[in-house]
Image (cartoon, grey):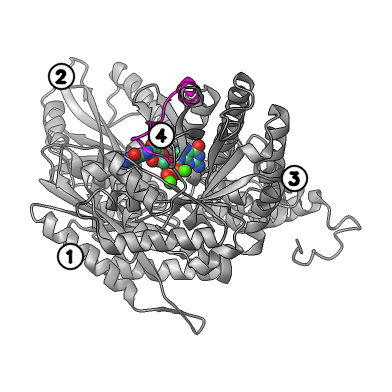
Amino acid sequence: MKLPSQPAGSGADADGPEDRLRRFVTIWSRAVFPVTATSMTRQEFERHLLPPARELCDALHARPFDTSPAHRVGQALVAAHCTDPDALSRSLGVVDAYLVLYCGDEGGTDAEELRARCSRLQHAMAAGFAQALRERTLAEQESIAHSALSARSAAELALHATESRFRAIFDGAAIGIGIADLDGNVLEVNETLTRMFGGLEHTVTGKNLLEWSHPEDGPHVWRLYDELVRGERESYRVEKPYYRGDGTVLWTNLTVSLLRDAAGAPQYQLALLEDTTERRLLNLRLRYEATHDALTGLPNRTLFFERLEKTLLPGGESRFGLAYLDLDGFKVINDSLGHSTGDRLLVEVADRLQSCVTAPGEMVARLGGDEFVALTTGPGSERQVTELADRMLAALATPISIDGRELTVRGSVGVVEGPAGERTAAEVLRSADITMYRAKSAGGNRFEYADEEADARAITRHGLTTALPAALERGEFFIEYQPLVHLGDGSVYGAEALVRWCHPQHGVLGPDRFIPLAENTGLIVPLGRWVLQEAVRQARFWQDEAPGGHPATGPLRINVNLSPTQLHHPGLVAETVDVLERSGLEPGALCLEVTESALIGADDDLLKPLRQLAEMGVDIALDDFGTGYSNLANLRRLPVSVLKLDRSFTQGMQQHPVDPVDLKIVEGIVQLAHSLELAVTVEGVETGAQAQQLRDLGCDTAQGWYYARPGAPDRIRSLALVDAV
Ligand code: C2E
Ligand code: CA
Ligand code: CA
């Protein structure tokens, strides 16, 4: 990182970390010194800031990251009499602008991470500052109250107190002190209190407390007051605003104590006022920062959740509607045009979405990244939320122009609507999220309504997906085998391995329930490897049991399904060879089934591993043929030796009379396949009539319930042996 020019004469080691730290301290003390009440000189003050600066610098790089040093730095500011809120905001400004610049070099933490850490350190600093300030004021109040009490017990009436200790505190206190009679007439105030009210004594002394009500006073404020002047309570403490003479508002922490005379009868009230106006503003600002997104200024996730939770309370708003928007393809823009363009795009999107919320009670927030959410409440929310979602999509319709470039952004919206009091905020948001994904997978640039069934499906899907890896480790998968037969005589020549999952809660799940999930997560690779190993081992076992196999068909063969992801996996050939070698099964006894759709448009790179396997003698079957609309002429390019005609063709053979066009199609496919020297297997044969029909059409082999359902491996052996006898 290139640093700004060093001050002249800063020595040979001008670029050392220590010099940079000192430079940071100089900037910090210059910024803060003018607003401190310290008796130190500026040089002394600068030396004083060095240790806290070092703490911040160390905290920036510490592993693990910890914000407590910054909290202590905030407290140290108060201890150094930097109690003016301006001292805090200036300090935060310096840390924000210079800490990473001057202290970010060592440690090898990346820039993004440093920025994130720096802003968390600032928050901790502000919190430490606020806490220390509060404790300090409380301590001061404590000592004043204590003196007042001792003055009282000495029966030296506070009003005419000659007791020097009380008088000294009264005059010199940093908090406002006033004494009034029981009718509320202000008798005496100290200088601080006068200053708090604007500096003119007559605006305070001689007034009556009852004139100082404020619309924001809680009802308890004046109830406590009444109880005190009636002698029913000794003291109370409230937060109370006052109007100053010029109409501005002074916020205070007010503590009032009752002073009694020597005989114990109520006589005066003593008020201690701590000015909390600035701190309130600071808190408001911190609260604003904590609840708003720094980039777009929209309410953030925290604030949105607060609002949603409030809306969903039973007995709150009657209904709610929520529209959850995620930009389509934002990542592409961000990656290709850079983050700063991405940021500007988000700001513009935020502005447009903000203009969509028009009714009172509606809000739009940024949840993070490119996710936004709008909320509407009230009895008409069903109609309102639809209109809101419409407006949001419409707002994105016009391209966004950045640096002369017109960027088109679209969004997908998940809409959830319903009565309050039934679901938690997290549940509602999860449903919206799932629904948004449904809108996305339907092509994006649209909205969808949440639907409980779709939610439930997605949730089970999610549950199954996350359970998959452990299931493989725990051995919850098993394989069923379905015989493959010759159509001519019905003899069994092999079997297809079909995987199942014995799920501890859901029972046995078919592959259609989990293979797509395993595909998405990549778990299909280890799962497929396991199926291959297991099936090949089983085939070898059958062969060992009946060497030579069936007299006509030879040793039993095994078919194993390959998913598209496995096809792309670089280890496919080596692993298959390894599995075959370990088991001792000859490659010609293995057939890998690949779906037609996985090979549509396949280029030579993708076909290469299949070609290598085919050259070794492994059969490749084109599974589900006829569903992928592949170009028949393409078949010639593919290293396949078997076509597996999809079940839908066989189903056509069920009807009476059979559609002659169907027959012609199947006949054509069979002829074409044979001319390319491919064998044709038909799937899903359920009746003898179908088998007859397909045999007549020239199909070679078959699979289906008519012969056997998928089952345990022993079943195959017995079927094959019965055959052989
Ligand atoms: P597929 O390869 O087309 O497998 C044939 C499917 O048809 C099997 O369903 C089988 O049980 C079913 N079937 C067999 N005969 C009949 C019949 O006469 N009538 C009817 N209606 N159906 C019949 P299954 O076992 O549910 O498998 C579904 C799909 O899951 C398979 O379709 C295959 O694509 C995939 N699959 C199964 N095991 C694996 C595996 O180990 N790896 C991969 N990647 N996919 C697998
Ligand atoms: Ca198959
Ligand atoms: Ca199939």
Q: Residues within 10 Å of mark 3 (few under 14, many from 20)?
A: few
In space, the residues marked 3 and 2 are separated at their CA atoms by 69 Å
Disc 1 residue type? Glu
Q: According to the image, label 1 marks what residue?
A: 387
Most foreground residue, 58 or 520: 520
Look at the image and say whether residue 109 sits in the magenta stretch.
no
Choose the circle earlier in sequence order: 3 or 4. 3
Above or below, 175 against 21 in this view is above
Most foreground residue, 545 or 612: 545
Disc 4 residue type? Leu
Asked whether, in this view, residue 27 is left or right of residue 475, the answer is: right
Decide if residue 577 is in sight here: yes
Residue for point 17% across, 22% down:
233
Q: Could you tell me which secondary element the residue under label 1 belongs to?
A: helix
Choose top left, top right, bottom left or bottom right for residue 462.
top left
Q: According to the image, label 3 marks what residue?
A: 107
Which mark identifies residue 464?
A: 4
Disc 3 residue type? Gly
